[in-house]
Amino acid sequence: MVMPQFNNARSTATVGHQGQSCATGVWIALIILSIWLASLVWLLTTPLSTSTCLLIPVSVLGQTFLKTGLFITAHDAMHGVVYPSNLRINHGLGAIAAYAYALFPYKQLVRKHWLHHRYPECALDPDFHNGRDSRFIPWYLNFMGKYWSWQQFTGLAITVGGISYLGQICPLNLLLFWALPLVLSSLQLFYFGTFLPHRGVKGRHYQPYQNPNKKLTWLVSLLTCYHFGYHHEHHTYPQVPWWQLPQVAARFNLA
């Protein structure tokens, strides 16, 4: 897959390139994928009981965080920063992460996400409310409608139903540890990655992005959405992987 290129001189800055020829991004992607899959299998196959009820909220939040990590991995792959030295491996991991997240077609995600970067906060931006209702819920529903399709939803239902039937998995386990984290993750990604950074924009023109992570500690920034509150930094330096965004903010006093 050939990646589009920005006509933005700053995107070619050396920021974030240090160490990117190594496999750091691959290892981080594989760790997220492995922990998510292993924990999901364990949670889906472990019978619920009175003694495990207290662990359910923690497990749901953990699965939500890992689910979000899958999408963040796919997102970084769209920018070629999971493994810059080998784009075939880079996009392969991105496709796996996108498919594991919610059967998302990776090439379609790439196309729409690069439209978001090329035409931020205007009619051609698939993530923006485009002058429609900019309140959270209406914007979220409009946003999801641009990325979900009935075919995808049907395929997801058939896949999950088949796994549930063949593996004799309790429907409640599926609801708690697969379906609920998926919904919560979509809300998390939208709130921290789209709504907060791009709200309050009026008119069809580029404006500096807000930085929701401005007053957050490193750990809280990680837990909210893998540092994607540093949205201005990401748009300015899209070649920087998610784990280096706080360093960019500190170095260039953008936070």
Image (cartoon, rainbow, N blue to C red):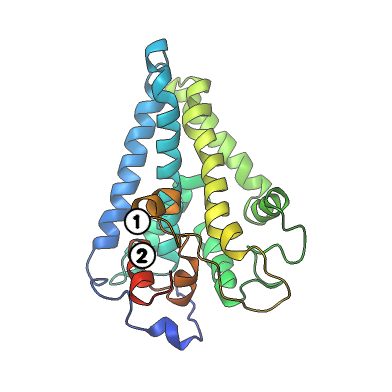
Lateral position of residue 23 relative to residue 15, left or right: left
Can residue 96 be seen from the camera position used here? no
Which residue is identified by label 1? 218
Q: Count of labels shown? A: 2
Q: Amino acid at mark 2?
A: Pro
Picture coordinates of residue 22 (x, y %)?
A: 22, 68
Residue 181's place in the image compared with 249, above or below, is above
Picture coordinates of residue 14 (x, y %)?
A: 32, 82
Q: Amino acid at mark 1?
A: Trp
Which quarter of the figure is the N terminus placed in? bottom left
**Residue at 64% in and 62% down:** 199
Q: CA distance from mark 2 to mark 1?
A: 7 Å
Sequence-first tag of 2 and 1:
1
**Residue at 25% in and 55% down:** 27
Which residue is identified by label 2? 246
Can residue 255 be seen from the camera position used here? yes
